[in-house]
Image (tube, rainbow, N blue to C red):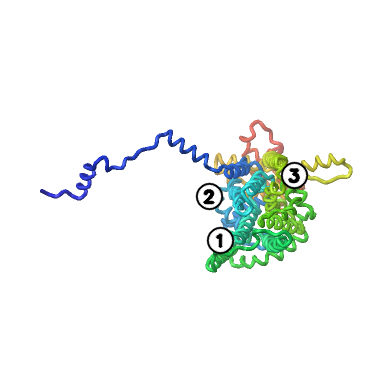
Amino acid sequence: MNPQPPVTNMRIAAGTSSVAEAAPIISPAPLDAWENLKRRAAATDWTPWIIVGLGAFLRFFMLGIKPPHFDEGINGWFVDQMVKNGFYRYDPTNYHGPLHFYILFVCQTLLGRNLWAIRLPVVLASIFSIHLTMKFEPFVGRKVSRLAALAMAVSPGFVFYGRYSIHEVWLLLFSMLFILGLLGLWQRGTVNYLWCAGMGVAGMILTKETYIIHVGCAVIAAFVTWISHKITRLPDAKPVRQSWTYVDLIMMAGTGLAVIIFFYSGAFLNWPGVAGLYKTFYAWFKTGSDGAGHGKPYYYWLQLIVRYEQPVLIALVLAPLTQRIQNLSLRYLAIYGVGTFLAYSIVSYKTPWCIISIVWPFLFVFGSLPLLVADAYRRILFVGITALLALSLGLSVSLNYFRCSTFNEFNWSSERSLPANLVQFSTWEPYVYVQTYNDVWKLTKPLLRLAKSNPTYYQLVGHLIRTSTYPLPWMLGDFTKVGYYEHNNMPGTLDADFLLVQEDKIGEVEAKLHDTYYTEPLTIRPYQDPSKLYFNAKVFHKLFPGRVPEFSGKSAH
């Protein structure tokens, strides 16, 4: 009798196995699965998810509602130069580190030239900052960290600049990571917090030269906190024994240094860029002292806080009371926040987006208000906190979805009554700073509409005859035959498919035009001379059905 092959024997064995020996596979009943899901949902702490979800919604909703800011156009232009050169050529007089540009380069390469592509990384960083706020829980407590995170989620400034493709959100994120690392080393001493502190410093260096303010204030705040402890003793003031080794320190420092050199050297293609790490401070100190067109009074940040950030205002006023709280981290954050606020107030050069990297420590002071109030007044305090957060949310919605491109100045006038001055102050929109007007859509939307219907329209000839056309060079970057003419420069042939002409050049240009054009007034941004927009009727007549061209050149008569 021939033996069966092994596989056959295995099959026979499987077929003769008893039912008792087989492991039955029983699928859970749908009802049991549903009950299990409900139990898991009931056991889940949804509060952090709700806070982060609210912050994400406010930052993503209608993300493209406002045109790209002047700086967004500049940043986009730098990314276009990276495409041509293969790397970012760091310039120490640009006052910004290279990291943001490399992140934009990756995102724009994947998603194309559009507002979502350049704003998405910053939106994600802003949302992660809310999450990072709750990571302070081991040091400040759960309620404090969550209240601070909620305040950040709905803050007009944190939402507004969390929807802007600028460097400041990265500075916010990395400065928070740095301070979290310091507190962790002080009170936990683990290698994870060592990496938080080290990568926070590296990230700040890669982001903006103002990292020096944050590092300096962090060191000074540690000394002041020690003095504060001598005045009112803290139970957890003594640093814990560190559990990381020198090998961990070398690995962390080496990684941070390697990342800094990699980006500043343009991926090793521009070694002079590394020298910019120290050269930038000469230019920055000069700009910071004279203002360079962005000079503001020392009380400028306080004005912004009063106008938009009422929770921060309350925290700023009550920050000295943290001396009564037996919590080292809250005292340190309050002292660090006050120090950073004062340091930035001294610098003459001020742009409003810096506010988010200045005031974030005060959100923890705001979250600690219940610790400063007697139990008998907790209900009143809860109502007050709710009202402040509701006010922040209302201001955030108004600013980000209704007035995000509104330019409105405020100047206190003795000729107006106090109520009239206060009313004007409440309509002032200082966060909307050098913001591009919606007027630019008059030019870009028709062009993009044609180009999307037929890619050959990307070859349209355009002349932009005016000074400072940003953000249009980035917005029109896919159009290959657009010329930019400043000062007294003019193209050889003025007739084109479209033109944008500065007010003082209109007469000279129109005298040399021959074709027929649809025209529109257009102003790019505040404090800039208006322009006149021309669309060649031969090309754009389908987009303006029934409309009579407003301008006819010589040959059209």
**Which is more N-terminal, label 1 or label 2?**
2
Q: What residue lies at 71% left-to-right and 66% top-to-bottom?
A: 282
Instruction: Name the one closer to the observer, 507 or 236.
Output: 236
Q: Residues within 10 Å of mark 1 (few under 14, many from 20)?
A: some
Q: Position of residue 351 (x, y in %)?
A: 73, 53
Residue at image mark 3? 429
**Residue 403 picture quarter:** top right
Instruction: Name the one closer to the observer, 557 or 530.
Output: 530
How many labels sit on residues? 3
Between tags 3 and 1, which lies in front? 1
Instruction: Name the one closer to the observer, 28 or 71.
Output: 28
Residue at image mark 2? 110
Task: Say what secondary structure mark 3 lies in.
Answer: loop
**Which is more N-terminal, label 2 or label 3?**
2
Q: Residues within 10 Å of mark 3 (few under 14, many from 20)?
A: many
Q: Amino acid at mark 1?
A: Thr
The Cα–Cα distance between marks 2 and 1, rounded to whole angstroms, is: 37 Å
Q: Amino acid at mark 2?
A: Leu
Q: What residue lies at 61% left-to-right and 67% top-to-bottom?
A: 272
Residue at image mark 1? 190
